[in-house]
Image (cartoon, rainbow, N blue to C red):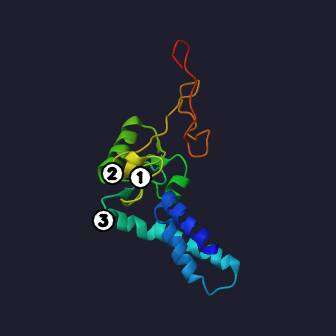
Amino acid sequence: MRRLLVAVAVVVLTLLTQVGGLALLVGLALARKNRRRVVRFLAPLGVYAGLTIVVVPLVARLFGRVPLPVFATQDEPVSPLNLLTCALNRHYARPPVRDLLVRTARASGEELHYLDAGFPFRGVPLLPHLSHGDGRKVDLAYAYLDRAGRPADARAHLFLGYGATEPPRPGEID
């Protein structure tokens, strides 16, 4: 039963993050002899963090992908709407796409927020965005103005930013 649960977890983590299944297997192997549950729990998380922060960005370049900015700066006013996007490795794109997003944000004078882009490597589909496999597509969050015409808070109403909609305006077809 334990092997079945690990196998299911590997598949689910791979579909969610592309490298999470590998991190789970390596982490469990490293912590196999340790009897403390906390070590067996933290080892895969540590492996995943190391892969995500250090290894994946370097290897992704070999596949023609670069991470989109995680935190907006004056020079690169682009960031994810939710940091979970980056933690799940769903913020990779081709360099020209990254450059286009940065140029667009600079030209608009406002911070640009993205939702999902793509995984760092080919091979695992980015569910439910099957078209994002080529590194050329990025889901963007809408930018709203408040009643005074100033940029509104960019945080989405829903957990990952998807699903929130505006009602139709008077005269628009719903």
Image marks 1 and 2: residues in contact by CB distance under 8 Å: yes
Of residues 103 and 166, the one nearer the viewer is: 166
Give the left or right position of residue 107, taking residue 53 as reference. Answer: left
Residue density around tag 2, few if under 14, some if 14–19, many if 20 or more, within 10 Å: some
The type of residue carrying mark 1 is: Gly
Q: CA distance from mark 2 to mark 3?
A: 14 Å
Which of 52 and 7 lies nearest the eye of the viewer?
7
The answer to which of marks 1 and 2 sits earlier in the sequence is 1
Image coords of residue 134 (percent x, y): 33, 51
Seen as rendered, the residue at the extreme bottom is 33
User: Mark 3: few, some, or many residues within 10 Å (few <14, many ≥20)?
Assistant: few
Which numbered circle lies on residue 134?
Answer: 2
For the residue marked with disc 3, what is the amino acid?
Leu
Which residue is rendered at x = 54% and y = 40% of the image? 162
User: Of callouts 3 and 1, which one flags the residue occurring earlier in the amino acid sequence?
Assistant: 3
- Secondary structure under the numbered disc 2 in the rendered image: helix
Q: Position of residue 73 (x, y in %)?
A: 45, 50
Residue 106 in which image quadrant: top left
Alpha carbon distance from label 3 to label 1: 15 Å
Q: How many marks?
A: 3
Residue 27 higher or lower than 83, as above or below: below
For the residues marked 1 and 2, what is the alpha-carbon distance in whole angstroms?
Answer: 8 Å
**Badge 1 density bin: few <14, some 14–19, many ≥20, Cα 10 Å:** many
Reading the image, the residue beneath label 1 is: 118
Residue drawn at x 55%, y 77% as measured from the top left? 27
Q: Secondary structure at mark 3?
A: helix
Q: Mark number for residue 62?
A: 3
Q: Secondary structure at mark 1?
A: loop
At label 2, the amino acid type is Asp
Name the front one of labels 2 and 3: 2
Where, by quadrant of the figure, is residue 65 drawn?
bottom left
Q: Do tag 3 and tag 1 residues touch (Cβ < 8 Å)?
A: no
